[in-house]
Amino acid sequence: MDQFKSKVAPVDGRLAVLLPGMGAVATTFIAGVEAVKAGLSQPIGSLTQMAHIRLGKRSEKRWAMIKDLVPLAKLDDLVFGGWDPIPDDAYTAAAKAKVLSPEHLAQLQPSLSQIKPMAAVFDKNVVKRLEGANVKRGTKRELANQLMQDIRGFMDKNKCTRAVMVWCASTEAYQQPGPEHQSIAAFEKALDADHPNIYPSQLYAYAAIMSGVPYMNGAPNMSCDFPALVQLAEKRGVAIAGKDFKTGQTLMKTIIAPGLKARMLGMEGWFSTNILGNRDGEVLDDPANFKTKEVSKLSVLEQILEPERYPELYKDLQHKVSIHYYKPRGDNKEGWDNIDIVGWMGYPMQIKVNFLCRDSILAAPIVLDLALFSDFAHRAGMKGIQEWLSFYYKSPMAAAGLQPEHDLFIQQTKLKNTLRHLMGEEQITHLGLEYYQS
Ligand SMILES: NC(=O)c1ccc[n+]([C@@H]2O[C@H](COP(=O)([O-])OP(=O)(O)OC[C@H]3O[C@@H](n4cnc5c(N)ncnc54)[C@H](O)[C@@H]3O)[C@@H](O)[C@H]2O)c1
């Protein structure tokens, strides 16, 4: 088993964490890392920083922190950069996002105010509700080249040995893959033809993959989840994953639904609605952008409950999701869920969930874990879709023809077993019969 362990390249030098989109999520993530480094805070919500992992049999009593088992970049070695059409530095952007208190931000101002976004590849046709002057000009091919120059320039300037990219920018309008997304050749031809179906996030993903930089998509829009970029990632040996950070209401869904199904309880309906008032909410108020989010959120229940396998329990399930932009609520989203479940002899019951969550507070540790794990995956020689990172996503990518796994606990087992596998440790099956055999 040590054959895998020996293949993981060591962590040496600094890691560039490149963030297209430096709004609420990205700045809360950076601020949190700086706060942890300064001893002001704990990295709550992050597996890479806080979780333990069991190794070997229970009788061995061997536990390690994930960060001690797996060679991950240290927080002190992260260097943050990014792009945004709005030219605010990270301190100003964080202050405007109003996720963190002014007292917290004041302590972090010296480091945050130094981080200024590079000019973005931005297309107003894809994100209608935003305006921004900090944008690049050129054809799509030229824009992709400029992004590759930015990546190289940032790494050189900051003396980084490696980089990862995590898309934290606004959700783009809904799009289905077209002929130009089907192969590397078709995609590159479309780039040269300046084709309107090549959206900005796809240019960032292309530039990252071409630069040997892992690409993680935090939004629900189609960015690296189509044949051309999956093939390119495999060809160039680059890790990719997506999409849509699993926070808030969908996190709850993937915690509760597997439990109800495990007990073979039926379900007639799940009605979800929420209000939020941040810039993300404003962008999602446009029907084209909301459609992207809706598709991502709706797929979850069906795949967990498998109505085709359990028609008696879930055949008539009605699943509704709505998001309302309501300015006073800011980043502190409120979500309501009404779940109509059915028990023994068909008797109905209801579950109500009222989650007063903080969107970016839940998303920030996901950005950290994806940055560190994707860098680790790259050093371990993993390429293409990283299904073991599904744990972090609402709409996880999986190999063609495979159903993605949505159950949070199966996702967690997959993640931990992948880490054990890569570090030459035994897989844990939870069978446990050996404790009872004489
Ligand atoms: N917070 C959560 O819980 C959560 C969960 C899942 C997904 N997401 C997604 O994460 C993304 C970020 O959320 P947020 O709350 O930080 O939003 P935000 O509006 O605060 O920040 C997004 C930033 O992206 C910038 N941007 C837009 N297009 C860009 C481009 N082409 N290149 C570079 N920058 C661009 C915007 O100017 C803005 O500053 C959104 O797509 C959101 O849907 C967030």
Image (cartoon, grey):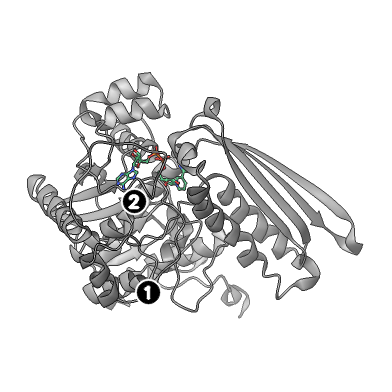
What residue is disc 1 on?
Answer: 179
The N terminus lies in which quarter of the figure?
A: bottom left
* Distance (Cα) linking label 2 and label 1: 24 Å
Residue 224 placement (x, y as % from top left): 35, 64
Residue 152 placement (x, y as % from top left): 12, 54
Q: Residue 167 has which mark?
A: 2
Nearest-to-viewer mark from 2 and 1: 1
The C terminus lies in which quarter of the figure?
A: bottom right
The residue drawn where x is 31% and y is 69% is 229
Tell me the kind of residue under disc 1: Pro
Whether residue 6 is visible, yes or no, is no
Above or below for 43 versus 259 = above
Comparing 276 with 398, the one in front is 276
Badge 2, how many Cα within 10 Å: few under 14, some, many 20+? many
The residue drawn where x is 71% and y is 76% is 309
Comparing 138 with 29, the one in front is 138
Above or below for 34 versus 191 = above
